[in-house]
Amino acid sequence: MEKRLILEAQNICKSFPGVKALDKVSFELYEGEVFALLGENGAGKSTFIKVMSGIYQADEGALFLHGNPVKFPTPRSAFDAGICVVHQELNYIPELTIAENIMMSSHPLTKRKLVDWSKMYQDSIEVMEKIGLELDPRTIISHCTVAQKQQVEIAKALYWNAKILILDEPTSALNNVEIENLMRYLEVIKQSGVAIVYISHKIEEIFQVADRVGILRDGVHVKTLNVPETNKEELIALMVGRTIDDMYPKQNATFGDVVMKVENLSNQDLQDISFEIRKGEILGVYGLMGSGHSELGRMLFGDIPATSGTLTIDGKDARIKSPAEALQLGLAYVPSERKTEGLVLIHSVLQNIVTVHYQKENKRLLNLPYEQKTTQKWVDRIRIKTPAHHTPVGSLSGGNQQKVVLAKWMEANPKVLIMNEPTRGIDVGSKSEIYQLLDEFCSQGISVIMITSEMAELLAMSDQVLVLYGGRISSRFSRDELSQVKVVSAAIGGKSDATA
């Protein structure tokens, strides 16, 4: 049976000062399909979905819904027309229950005009059951996991009779099991006739979930393909405008002396953490949610200080009680949450990049020539797409924001660079560039602790790997011992031949 056209975008254009974000972009979207939108950071994906959902108004072009021309002057008008967006930064009120979040602003009422709590809870259960979500609707949503909050957002869209569901980087904060569950939910939703726009940098997911894929590059619609008729290499080439011959340019490094030694470090999240890392080495850290792998970086950097154990840097005892002390000792930390922990969003690209340098050197006077030169260096080196040095960093795409975080810490010339999810929300081309930078850093003698949930980069870039389970190191592997089966087995508490 032929699927019906639900939405058509014709020659959509959108410009901002100094940037043409969309240049005559046209797409078609059909009922009951998953349409993947693919492109590098800054390619125009976020701008396009904001035009679709009424956040931005197109400068030129037209939208047609069920064949009729439409304009969405506000997000509410798009929502009322059945276009619902689940943003990467989830939109919920943490103090309210699941049911209250699902039925935001329109609670069912009794004849006496009071809230009909029984009906609200029952209706919430029924809509959650459609996607296999079994939660008590009375649960305060702040008590839910990230995956559960996302599922509640999807349930809310279904409750409000969404015709088009837009998912922006839906798996960026999910583990493998949660991702598999999401894929099952999407198949159920698709079968009900809802059209899904799926935005992700994880190309493997495109082949798992999408029917068609549209590629944007520099604000231009390059091509739309049927997913079964394409492959990863073709999509990458269309995204970046070139082929990437070596995604993981890991060289056989020559390591120096031990730069950091950790013995039995413990705090409220971790117990008896011990390891060594040598100059020029990449130490990969892996674990499932709740294993303590994310907390490890924060403990080493003094954000959640250790309560026992010892740490030495270059053979000298280092008692790190704060990030400021860690910075002075030659440590740097790239957090997983760039918007809340890595950047000051209202400040400029320039201000964000130079801030750590001023902190480390205890500078009281501004050096304007240094600021301009340094910012331009990093803009060129890691291809930060920004209209100007003084553009507020909050207006950049997620991937370009992450590049600014990386530049800020790289400028500090650290001995040990701790990176928590270094490529989360970053496109394929930018990932390859960051891996090249890591390789370059290691060749200069800098050590990297790479905390990641990306199995491919863990296996490809690590010289040794620690796997955490239950707040402890369950296994450790050298590079020649690594395999996905061994790592996953250790992450779920299984035994390994390479157990520490």
Image (cartoon, rainbow, N blue to C red):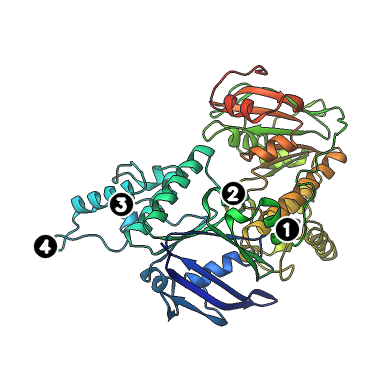
- Residue drawn at the location 33% of the way across and 41% of the way down: 134
For the C terminus, which image quadrant?
A: top right
Query: In the image, is 146 to the left or to the right of 374?
Result: left
Alpha-carbon distance for marks 3 and 1? 40 Å
207 or 367: nearer the viewer: 207
364 or 177: nearer the viewer: 177
Going from N to C along the chain, the mark reached first, 2 or 1, is 1
- Residue drawn at the location 62% of the way across and 58% of the way down: 398
Total marks shown come to 4
Callout 2 crowding tier (Cα within 10 Å): few <14, some 14–19, many ≥20: some
Q: Find disc 3 in the rendering and name its residue.
A: 127
- Tag 1 secondary structure: helix
Query: In the image, is 33 to the left or to the right of 420?
Result: left
- Looking at the image, do the residues carrying marks 4 and 1 touch, with CB atoms under 8 Å apart? no
- Looking at the image, do the residues carrying marks 2 and 1 touch, with CB atoms under 8 Å apart? no
Alpha-carbon distance for marks 4 and 3? 23 Å
Alpha-carbon distance for marks 2 and 3? 31 Å
Q: Find disc 1 in the rendering and name its residue.
A: 237
Q: Position of residue 347 (x, y in %)?
A: 65, 63
Going from N to C along the chain, the mark reached first, 4 or 2, is 4
Q: Find disc 4 in the rendering and name its residue.
A: 111
Going from N to C along the chain, the mark reached first, 2 or 3, is 3
Res 309 seen here = no
Give amino acid for label 1.
Ala
Q: Report which quarter residue 469 is drawn in.
A: top right
Q: Which of marks 4 and 3 is in front?
A: 3
Alpha-carbon distance for marks 4 and 1? 61 Å
- Tag 3 secondary structure: helix
- Tag 2 secondary structure: loop
Going from N to C along the chain, the mark reached first, 4 or 1, is 4
